[in-house]
Amino acid sequence: MEQSNIPLAERLRPQTLDGYIGQQHLVGANAVLRNMIEGDKLSSFILWGPPGVGKTTLARVIANRQNRKFYTLSAVNAGVKDVREVIEDAKRQRFFSTPNPILFIDEIHRFSKSQQDSLLGAVEHGTVTLIGATTENPSFEVIAPLLSRCQVYVLKPLEVDDLRLLLERAIATDVYLKQLRFNIEETEALFRFAGGDARKLLNVLEIVVGSFDGDEITISNSIVTERLQENIALYDKNGEQHYDIISAFIKSMRGSDPNAAVYWLARMIEGGEDPLFIARRMVILAAEDVGLANPNALLMAQACFDAVKVIGMPEGRIVMSQCAVYLATSPKSNASYMAIEAAIAQVRLSGDLPVPLHLRNAPTKLMKDLGYHKGYKYAHDYTGSFVELDYLPEKLSGTTFYTPGDSAKEREIKALMDRLWKGKY
């Protein structure tokens, strides 16, 4: 059967909001982005989410829906000159009755400060409506003046129901796939390899379909796994290894193997990975996996991030290597991470429990009369700056969220907790 040179993911790219799959919290009925789009009240915003969840597609759908001129730049290969050329062209096209054009910048987190600065005036004066797309937290990567002029919308990985709908649509509507006969026995592996990424799902489907000689296609867990293993280079062609290698890097540091950590660090450096992405992940690991077993780890990781940001590459590789070795060889504790996870789970279970009256401030007479602040004991008025008092909501009194680990530092913390609270926690 004749095959198209256009990838399946591109052939199936929707043109309207009704054809867009996923992100119902943003584009579903009465959702914030749909109301903005359909009400012709579009303002600049940034789409933040993992790859393959529809950031670029959503930007194009919006441009089509509003019949606006659409400029697109990739932060990977565009410079200040490219930005200024787009802005000048947008100014020349500006008329009273014409809506301002949309400037879509993919991977906006890769823009330097000077590149982002060059956008400020155009966004502020409405020369263009900016839509940025990023896989990284814009709070870290987008300069504050630009971020303050943009709303940030978070896109989520596609759910299984979304992936199933996408699969059904591909088989039913694609000009090539609809000519085939599909026997779908299982979809678990197909959706697992997709990992919430629409583009991955369609890439995998295309690989599996291409591995059959005839017009009858069988989809099962074993077939999908086997055909992907045979075509792993094709599967990884869109940079999926980025996530595998950072995962190996994190697991090596967590597993106290400095040699492996430095190796995976070198793989990312040689592969052109964003050094601030690497440094930021070490900050996270310092808190999540080293924690209070070595409190200095977080300081080291933050200093590494700041240093790499200031000095850049290639010298930044030395700082990152030092930090990676330090984190890998530090004692480990995830007790603080587990504590916040347990506390969040409790909040979701028990809801908004009232703050005990003795912990509330009483700035007015009425509040005092109602018992606010009554019974509160100021810790510094007592020996050792400690006095036993309930600080949790009444229903949760005595609940333990933080359990110290077995590192030397946390054994000290456990001894302190036992001495102060006498077995309450």
Image (cartoon, helix red, strand yellow):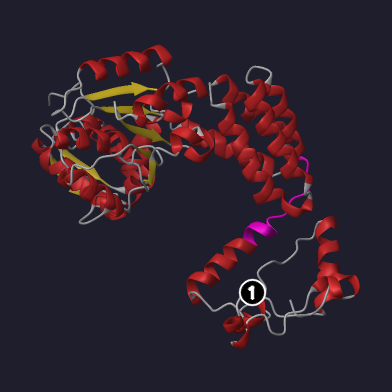
Task: Give x and y (percent) for residue 194.
Answer: 35, 43
In the image, the segment drawn in magenta is: 329-338
Q: What number of labels is visible? A: 1
| Residue 279 higher or lower than 114, as above or below | below
| Residue 3 higher or lower than 36, as above or below | above
Furthest toward the right, the residue is 383
Q: Could you tell me which residue is drawn at 26 percent across and 38 percent down?
A: 58
- The image quarter containing residue 17 is top left
Q: Could you tell me which residue is drawn at 26 percent across and 35 percent down?
A: 59
Mark 1: which amino acid? Asn
- The image quarter containing residue 393 is bottom right
Label 1 secondary element: loop
- The image quarter containing residue 47 is top left
Quadrant in which the C terminus appears? bottom right
Task: Give x and y (percent) for residue 110.
Answer: 47, 26
Q: Could you tell me which residue is drawn at 65 percent across and 26 percent down?
A: 308
Kindly tell me whether residue 165 is visible in this rendering: yes
Q: In this view of the protein, which residue sits in the foreground, 186 or 20?
A: 20
Magenta stretch contains residue 332: yes
Position of residue 137 in the picture relative to residue 372 (left or right): left
Task: Give x and y (percent) for residue 270.
Answer: 58, 19
Position of residue 243 in the picture relative to residue 261 (left or right): left
Quadrant in which the N terminus appears? top left
Q: Main secondary structure of the magenta part?
A: loop
Task: Give x and y (percent) for residue 123.
Answer: 35, 29
Q: In this view of the protein, which residue sits in the foreground, 47 or 374?
A: 374
Kindly tell me whether residue 13 is visible in this rendering: no
